[in-house]
Amino acid sequence: MTENSASSAYDVVILGGGSGGYSCALRATQLGLKVVLVEKGRLGGTCLHNGCIPAKALLHAAEVADQTRQSELFGVRTSFQGVDIAGVNSYKDKVIAGLYKGLQGMLRSRESLTLIQGEGRLVSPTTVEVDGVRYEGRHVVLATGSVPKSLPGLPIDGDRVVSSDQALFLDRIPASAVVLGGGVIGVELASAWKSFGVDVTIVEALPHLVPAEDEDISKGLERAFRKRKIKFELGSRFSGVEYTDGGVRVTLENGKQLDAELLLVAVGRGPVSTGLGYEEAGVAMDRGHVLVDEYLRTNVPTISAVGDLIPTLQLAHVGFAEGILVAERLAGLRVPPIDYDGVARVTYCEPEIASVGLTEAKAQEQYGSDKVVTSKFNLGSTGKNKILKATGEIKLVQVLDGPVIGVHMIGSRMSEQIGEAQLIYNWEALPAEVAQFIHAHPTQNEALGEALMALAGKPLHVHN
């Protein structure tokens, strides 16, 4: 221990207090380990402060706006007087503040956990330095997360050209917006803004929106967005942007120009790793990501990494699971690797997308096209969805005469149906086994049961 060192008696030194970092800290203390957690910003990281929570609060406000406009469809007379963005932000900020306060209290209550506020840097395979003080431990966990990316030559000014972080805290509702990127972040914000009355156009370089999803689901979202009058340019690459009197003019490589008040850059998030001492400590990297094995160990025996910093799914619940896995491994427990295909994936636009397992294309690639069976079920044929005037589809992917290996859903509130779908995939359930479950009627959930009954060869509410 050096002269400027803190106690070296820590079992785990964690750099980063987001989803992966704080879950690792909580689980490690439960297992009797002594932990120091270093965070330069606010505990909770991107998900709580600049991602999941504020985005979903905006999307719920958007849902309320849509329900108000559509209330007469259900015989209820209301008048929609507009969106008070200051009120929306106040509601959103209260949600964040409440969760933040709870998280702080939970972490501070752990006697074997030391919280350090400050910018940390890895200075050895077992040491993190913060403001000249060194914290040494038996093991270091890197959990420094991610930040919004941009494109070469596309500066983000925070006013006319904004990142997703900035878009979540705008103090105005733009009249029009171009959203650069049709992935999860782009379509969620485009959906919320359209509900707030914004004229939205999405620009996506790949052939479909949400290109990581099953193609049928992507096409379903495109149909739904056309109905909502959300415009999009697919297979179109960004070329440049210039300021105009009214905002910005976005030029695409095909020569098309789009005028709008605002440009949202939603081209993904990149790892936070530059200048933090990772490479100097010998940690293997690839384009800013820290490389790990299936147990989240780096090539340096005393260092693990979790969350958006590593090239796995950039989802808060993945960070939670990775943090827990590392804590349990360091405590000496036997841990299974994470099956990332078995992780629930949700896009909270309207309609929502929820999926788990393999897409049809990936299943055919893995098993062969002659060994893959698919089935589709129309959500609109069930009672509860009729009541809600909700439409959409469930698509199931099955190995021939084997288990269900993919569940893909699009429709209102599908995020609440993904739990059973996740069990079906992860327990390698056969369609006939799930078809025996009696789903409550009328519920949206019974649509998944009906879809499995159809796949098992005994469809009920399905027109032949």
Image: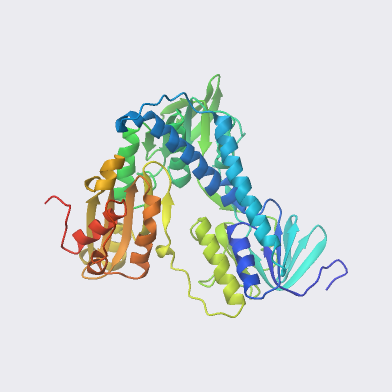
Foreground residue among 309 and 95: 95
Q: Residue at x 54, y 27 (%)?
A: 242
Residue at the far top: name it.
245
Across and down, in percent, residue 159 comes to 60, 30
Residue 118 quadrant: bottom right
Q: In this view, does 370 lie above or below 94?
A: below
Vertical position of residue 381 compared to residue 366: above or below: above
Q: Kindly identify the residue that appears in the image at 32 percent across and 70 percent down.
A: 428
Q: Quadrant of the N terminus?
A: bottom right
Please tell me which residue lies in front, 42 or 204.
42
User: Which image quarter: residue 124?
Assistant: bottom right
**Residue 435, located in which quarter of the rendered image?**
bottom left
Mark count: 0
Judge whether residue 16 can be spotted in this image.
no
Residue depicted at x 26% and y 42%: 386
Q: Position of residue 17 (x, y in %)?
A: 65, 58
User: Is 364 in front, or is 334?
Assistant: 334
Q: Which of 435 and 180 is in front in this view?
A: 435
Q: Is residue 70 left or right of residue 102?
A: left
Q: In this view, does 135 lie to the left or right of 50?
A: right
Q: Is residue 136 left or right of residue 152?
A: right
